């Protein structure tokens, strides 16, 4: 059964949420998982793509941006981290980092799902609904209170 982790940030900004997503993506990648970052839209996906190159000078997270006009599945097979906003990744990843307000219909094909919550009211409202949906469906949900963006590793 898919295990769900909610990372709860003290910050209110989208930038803090995306920065934490990059740190968490690096941690998941270093643990050997194939990861898919599911963005809200193409703009967020492109922002994640840029941030993964620059979020830390000594970090390298091999990744590719997916989308209807961007990347074919042949390139997606060669990188451990994909970023998209439309449908499920091909080939299947083991972990999903969901930055979309809703839950993708295909979330249960992953071993693990990570949700990132910051203190922005829209995100809080959307992710509260996600939490309740996962719990109603019987999925194990674990909260992680993150104290500060500036220190330590994610996960």
Image (cartoon, helix red, strand yellow):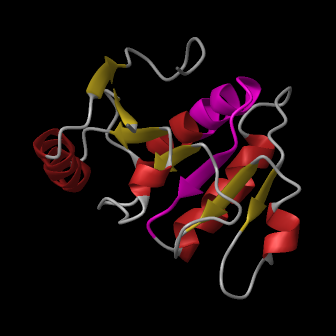
Judge whether residue 99 can be spotted in this image. no
Judge whether residue 92 can be spotted in this image. yes
Residue farthest along the front direction in this orientation: 1
Q: Nearer the viewer, residue 13 or 123?
A: 123
- 30 to the left or right of 110: right
Give the residue drawn at x 70%, y 23%. Answer: 31
- 132 to the left or right of 32: left
Q: Quadrant of residue 154?
A: top right
- 28 to the left or right of 125: right
Q: Quick check: 25 above or below 101?
A: above
Give the residue drawn at x 63%, y 55%. Answer: 48
Is residue 137 magenta-colored? no
Is residue 36 magenta-colored? yes
Give the residue drawn at x 61%, y 52%. Answer: 36
Number of residue marks: 0
Give the residue drawn at x 28%, y 23%. Answer: 143
Magenta region: 22-40
- 87 to the left or right of 80: left
Q: Nearer the viewer, residue 154 or 92?
A: 92
Q: Quadrant of the N terminus?
A: top left
The image position of residue 53, as x and y in percent, is 80, 47
Residue farthest along the bottom direction in this orientation: 69
The image position of residue 83, as x and y in percent, is 64, 60
Q: Nearer the viewer, residue 95 or 26?
A: 95
The image position of residue 2, as x and y in percent, is 40, 39
Q: Quadrant of residue 94?
A: top right
The image position of residue 106, as x and y in percent, is 42, 63
């Amino acid at each position: 059964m898919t295990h769900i982790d909610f990372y709860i940030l003290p910050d209110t900004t989208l930038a803090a949420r995306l920065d934490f997503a990059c740190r968490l993506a690096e941690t998941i990648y270093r643990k050997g998982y194939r990861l898919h970052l599911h963005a809200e839209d193409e703009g967020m996906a492109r922002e994640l793509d840029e941030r993964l190159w620059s979020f830390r000078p000594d970090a390298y997270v091999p990744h590719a941006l997916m989308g209807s006009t961007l990347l074919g599945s042949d390139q997606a097979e060669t990188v451990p981290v994909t970023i998209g906003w439309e449908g499920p990744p091909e080939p299947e990843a083991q972990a999903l980092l969901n930055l979309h307000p809703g839950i993708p219909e295909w979330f249960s094909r992953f071993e693990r799902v990570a949700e990132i919550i910051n203190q922005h009211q829209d995100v809080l409202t959307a992710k509260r609904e996600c939490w309740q949906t996962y719990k109603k469906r019987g999925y194990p949900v674990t909260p992680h209170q993150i104290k500060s963006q500036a220190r330590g590793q994610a996960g």
